[in-house]
Amino acid sequence: MAQRRINARDIIIEVEASTPDTWLPIEKLTTATVNPAESEETVETTDFESDGAAEVEIMQRGASMELEGQALQDSDTGALPVGRARVEEMAGEDKVAFDSLGRIRFRYPTSPNWRIWTCTFSLGEAGGGNNDKVSWGATIVKSGKTTTAAVTP
């Protein structure tokens, strides 16, 4: 089997709509970064018999995803693209405790499975300079274990 490089731009990221198991693409991203070690917690297990070598164990796993793009809205209605609108809804200031949890799924085109996270959503900074378009971004933090689902046609 030949090895090939994977294009970062080919990642497919979807957010769950308010209707369960209905997925909306998160549109027009320019950067998507998955950090599989975010929120990890370790415990030091070094003792006198460690001979000066540090020893640790991971006690908690975590992960996050950073999304970036340019702000978009319908020029007539001001409406956001549906996937981004859902992310912004889930990041709303009234979304706390259980209500702050939603789901995303993501994969590359050659993957036979979706990776699915229950997660929280936070919006990033928006703005830019004199000759920039307004930025848009979101941070998604996994809560609980990753699940998977087969890609269906």
Image (tube, rainbow, N blue to C red):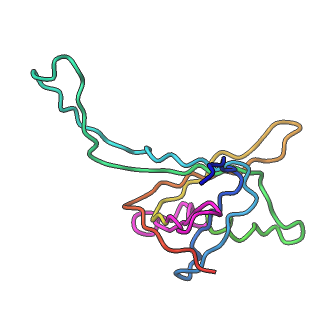
- Range shown magenta: 89-115
Task: Provide residue 21's location: percent of width, then percent of height.
Answer: 54, 80
Give the residue drawn at x 71%, y 52%.
Answer: 9
Above or below: residue 11 compared with residue 79: above
Taking the image as shown, residue 79 lies to the left or right of residue 130, namely: left
Toward the left, the furthest residue is 48
Toward the top, the furthest residue is 52
Count of numbered tags: 0
* Residue 132 included in the magenta stretch of the image: no
Task: Provide residue 71's location: percent of width, then percent of height.
Answer: 77, 54
Front position in the image: 58 or 24: 58
Task: Provide residue 18's location: percent of width, then percent of height.
Answer: 56, 78
Give the residue drawn at x 48%, y 54%.
Answer: 141
Quarter occupied by the N terminus: bottom right
Task: Provide residue 55's location: percent of width, then percent of height.
Answer: 23, 29
Give the residue drawn at x 89%, y 70%.
Answer: 76
Question: Residue 112 sits in which quadrant?
Answer: bottom right
Question: Residue 144 sits in which quadrant?
Answer: bottom left
Front position in the image: 60 or 134: 60
Taking the image as shown, residue 50 lies to the left or right of residue 4, namely: left
Quarter occupied by the C terminus: bottom right
Give the residue drawn at x 53%, y 67%.
Answer: 114
Above or below: residue 133 compared with residue 109: above
Question: Residue 73 sits in which quadrant?
Answer: bottom right
Front position in the image: 105 or 68: 105
